[in-house]
Structures are given as structure tokens and as C-alpha cells.
Amino acid sequence: MSVSEGLSFVAPVPDGPWETFLATIDSVERYLGPLARFADTLRRPRRALIVDIPIEMDDGRIAHFEGYRVHHNLARGPGKGGVRYDAAVTLPEVMALAGWMTVKNAAVNLPFGGAKGGIRVDPKQLSRKELERLTRRYTSEIGFLIGPDRDIPAPDVNTDAQVMAWMMDTCSVNSGTSATGMVTGKPVALGGSLGRVDATGRGVHVIGREVARRVGMPLEGARVAVQGVGNVGAVAARLFARSGARIVALQDRGASIVNPEGIDLGAALAHKAASGSLGGCPGSETISAEAFWDVESEVLVPAALEGALTADRAARLRTRMVLEGANGPTTPSADRILGERGIVVVPDVIANAGGVIVSYFEWVQDFNSFFWTEDEVTHRMDHILAGAFEQIWHTADELGVALRTAAFVVACRRVLEAREQRGLYP
């Protein structure tokens, strides 16, 4: 294993996730005033851990996987961020995701810094026992970095409550305690919070509602297109449909479907569960993946992986509002084009912050061993998220900038103010 401090060795990749993050930091520096002297703090992750994860496969072979845990900034509190299992995971991606977590936590004023983790693996190729062994070995390898007052992992792409349960149990066994606060997104029976599963998608809907109200666009009858129908996209689509919107297009990894009159979301998800894909869903037309970006809508929710909304797609897009359900789905060049075209883009650091807010609630509940009802969780999340968005909207109006810039200005000021007040050691 290796730990790198003050990283600067990652080769640049045009429109890569780390370059996208850095470009946004560059764009907001002018608004930071005297705090700008600390801006390089945001360009240099505090530390990154790269680990080898050897496990015994079911057939007796020894397989090796590469894992990461990155602490971007801890000025405002312990690190907070998910763990993803994906064959395309890289260190620059995890660095960017950790940076976005720093900004996201500060944008909604949570007492956390930014962290993220991942393993380069296709979890679909592993048995349940192999997945458990992988998770437990990874947890042990990063164990000296994580803890309820150091860094609290959570679910992300291809990880879930069961993976968090294995992580929690591994930490508990290794420390000789019942370490419920080591991770969030756990099963409710192990100290998880009610409302956590739907929180990120619910937050996307809350922000969509807030933007629609401010721009005078009724959600009743609004056309919504959702890219990615996992936990975030499916929940957001369900809540938009419940608000009277029409889900006109859906896309997963296997197929894209469209129906201008509205897709029966329940039927589409049932078809996907039965067949493994949205393709061929009754009552809708299957279209190409690229044609999805040409479907006309009022609201577009990219809720898959980063970098999906490219400059070419942004130039063709026919929508009024983009709600970033995924982390970093819009490239910098696409962001500029959308701004020039007058399309409202709500950045991921506020649009999908519902999940980390409820993770914060779970952390607080674990510390106190006192748990809230789902209605209490939902009400508190709505209140915090709507209030945070109000400040970001006001900042955008005051500075005459896009919402992404405003969100980063609000967040970076908070992070750098904490950095300034804490000072440099020694």
C-alpha cells in the first residue's frame, strides 16, 4: 500500500473528472476575495491511499484488485463520501469525487470534509462470497484512515446497505467494538437511518421543485427525461411522476426508451427487473443511446456516471433544466454551451446532496443511539436542502453567475474560512 500527500502527480486528461473539478475551482477563485490565497488547498487532495486487495476466489485462485481512498479536505470535519465498485474506477476519478464531496458537504453546511473510495472491479463478475471477501479485505486495508471521527464511508455506484454492513462488521471485529458510526447507508437493523435509500433521488426532486417555482414552470404536465434508472434516477422519476410530470424518456446501460405521452414508470422498472434492460418495454419505443439526448423535455436528470453530458450533446439538448443526479455528469465545455443557451443547470453538489444530508442524520443518530421516524428524516432533509439552495440561488443572482459557480463560491468560502481559522501547522 502507499499513501501520497499533497498530490500533484496525476497526468491531465482533457474533460476528465479531476480536470473538470479543477476547472471549476479556477472559475470561482476570483470571487473568494482574501481567502483566494488558500485556493491551492482545494487543488491538492490532502492524501490518497492506493491498496492491493488480494482475495481467494471460489475456485481457489488468488485474484488481486486495486482499491483507493482519498481525503480531499478535512478542514470542516471528518471525511465523508461513498465507495464505488466499478471496472472503470481510477485514482483521478476518486480524487474528483472526493473534491466534489468537500464542496457538497460545505454547500449544505454539514460538518464534514470530502472523501471518496473505490475498487476497480466489475462486481457482477463476483459471487456474493467473493464480494464479501473483497469488501472485508478493502475495509481492513483502509482501516487506519476511517472512523466516525476521521472518515465515514457510504454507498455509491454498485455498493449498497449490505456492503456497508460488511464494512461496519469488519471495523467492529478489528476494533473489538460495535462500531455502528463507522459507515452510513447501513441496514436499519444495524443503525441505519430510515429514509436513506430514497434520499438522493428525493433530493433531486426537491431541488427540481425549488427551481421550477423560481422560474415559473409548473411541474404538472412537465416532461422529464432521466438518464440512469438506478436508485437515484428511479426515485427521482417516481417523485416527479407523483407531482404530475410525464416521464418521456429513460436510459439505462442497455437501452433507451421514449414515449412523448408518458412512460408507465412502474411497468418500465418491472420490465427492467425481469429482462435486465429497459429495451422492448411495452408502451414505449426503444431508441439509440445517442437519440436519448435529442428527446424534448422540460427537465433532464443525468443520473448515471460522470462525463455523460458532452459538448456535442449540450448543443443538441432540448430542455429547460438540467438536474445533475450523478456526480460530475456535465463536462466543462458542455456547461459553457448550456449556459450560453440559457438552460438552467443545477450542479451535483446541491442537486444530489439529499443522500449525504441523510447520511449526516444517520451519523448523528448513531452517536446518540436515538432514531427518528421517516417523516422526521424527510422533513429535516427537505428543510436543509431547500435552505441551502435558497442561499445558492441568492448568491448566483447577487454575483450574476451560474448556479454551479454560486454553489462553489458558497462552499469554497466556508472551506477556506475554516482553513484560515485553523491556521497552518507548525
Image (spheres, rainbow, N blue to C red):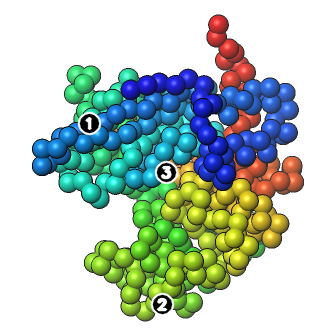
Q: Identify which residue, 398 or 117, lies in the foreground.
A: 117
Q: Residue at x 84, y 40 (%)?
A: 31
Query: Which quadrant would the N terminus be assigned to in this image?
Result: top left
**Mark closest to the chain's N terminus, 3 or 2:** 2
* Alpha carbon distance from label 3 to label 1: 31 Å
Left or right placement of residue 406 versus residue 74 in this view: right
* 71 or 231: nearer the viewer: 71
Q: In the figure, residue 325 lies in which quadrant?
A: bottom right
Residue at the extreme top: 426
Residue 40, how many percent across, how many down?
Answer: 72, 29
User: Residue beneath label 1, please?
Assistant: 54
Question: Dot 3 corresponds to which residue?
Answer: 355
Q: Nearer the viewer, mark 1 or mark 2?
A: 1
Q: Label 2 sits on what residue type?
A: Glu
Q: Is residue 271 above or below residue 226?
A: below
**Residue 137 seen in render:** yes
Question: Of the numbered discs in the image, which one, if any, rests on residue 285?
Answer: 2
Q: Amino acid at mark 1?
A: Pro
Question: Which numbered circle lies on residue 104?
Answer: none
* Residue 317 in the image, given as x and y percentages of width and height: 69, 75
Q: Quadrant of the C terminus?
A: top right
Q: Answer with mark 3 or mark 1, whichever residue precedes in sequence.
A: 1
Depth-wise, is mark 3 or mark 2 nearer the camera?
2
- For numbered disc 2, what is the local secondary structure? strand
Q: Secondary structure at mark 3?
A: helix
Image quarter of residue 336: bottom right
